[in-house]
């Protein structure tokens, strides 16, 4: 938005959470300034699940992406599983682990021996959630 207001590239951008590290003051017009700040996280908020769901944590550095992805899967299963099924082209299972395994196979995210790569698939779900590709 800042770059659109200035009509030129002034503020660096990235789809990765945590890209903006510090406050940046940018002049839009005479006597009009805009501040670019890091994302706002409530003071003292330490829940990694909440950070992942509000896109304040990079999916590639989340400690337990499978837990976050299973939470997302459970929410879709309870609230609107057809959106998830259509987007990923799989039928959801009641068990989120089974859904992760089905999706890993569908995405061909496999480890040696053809075992589903749960962590890679979980990170994909989180990334899609954070970028708004799949929305409840």
Image (cartoon, helix red, strand yellow):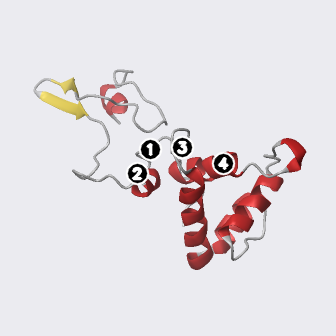
* Residue annotated with mark 3: 59
**Would you say the residues marked 2 and 4 are in contact, meaning their CB atoms lie under 8 Å apart?**
no
* Residue 40 image position (x, y, % from top left): 28, 46
Read off the residue under disc 2: 51
Residue 95 at what x, y percent from top left? 69, 73
- Which element is circle 3 on? loop
In front: label 4 or label 3: 4
2 vs 4, front mark? 4
Residue visible at 60% across and 75% down in the picture: 80
Q: Is residue 26 left or right of residue 111?
A: left
Q: Is residue 133 visible?
A: no
Badge number at residue 57: 1
Distance between the alpha carbons at the discs numbered 2 and 4: 18 Å
Q: Residue furthest left?
A: 31
Q: Earlier in the sequence, mark 1 or mark 2?
A: 2
- Say which quadrant the C terminus sits in: bottom right
- Does residue 114 appear in this view? yes
User: What whole-number distance in Å separates the C-alpha atoms at marks 1 and 2?
Assistant: 5 Å
Graded by Cα atoms within 10 Å as few (under 14), some (14 to 19) or many (20 or more), the crowding at tag 1 reads some
Q: Which residue is mark 4?
A: 119
Q: N-terminal of the two: label 1 or label 4?
A: 1
Q: Are marks 1 and 4 in contact (CB under 8 Å)?
A: no
C-alpha separation, residue under disc 4 versus residue under disc 3: 10 Å
Q: Write the residue at 51% across / 39% down.
A: 61
Q: Select label 1 or label 4 by which is in front.
A: 4
Residue 102 to residue 79: above or below:
above
Residue 30 pos. (x, y %): 13, 23
Q: Nearer the viewer, residue 74 or 27?
A: 74
Residue at left 37%, top 56%?
47
Cα distance in 3D space between marks 1 and 4:
16 Å
């Amino acid at each position: 938005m800042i770059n659109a207001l200035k009509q030129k590239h002034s503020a660096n951008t990235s789809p990765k959470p945590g890209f903006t590290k510090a406050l940046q003051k940018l002049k839009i017009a005479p006597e009009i300034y805009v501040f670019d700040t890091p994302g706002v996280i409530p003071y003292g908020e330490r829940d990694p699940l909440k950070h992942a769901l509000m896109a304040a944590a990079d999916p590639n550095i989340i400690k337990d992406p499978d837990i976050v992805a299973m939470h997302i899967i459970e929410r879709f299963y309870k609230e609107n599983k057809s959106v998830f099924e259509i987007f990923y082209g799989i039928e959801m299972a009641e068990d989120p682990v089974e859904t992760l395994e089905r999706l890993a196979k569908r995405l061909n995210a496999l480890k040696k021996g053809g075992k589903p790569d749960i962590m890679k698939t979980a990170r994909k779900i989180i990334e899609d959630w954070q970028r708004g590709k799949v929305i409840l």
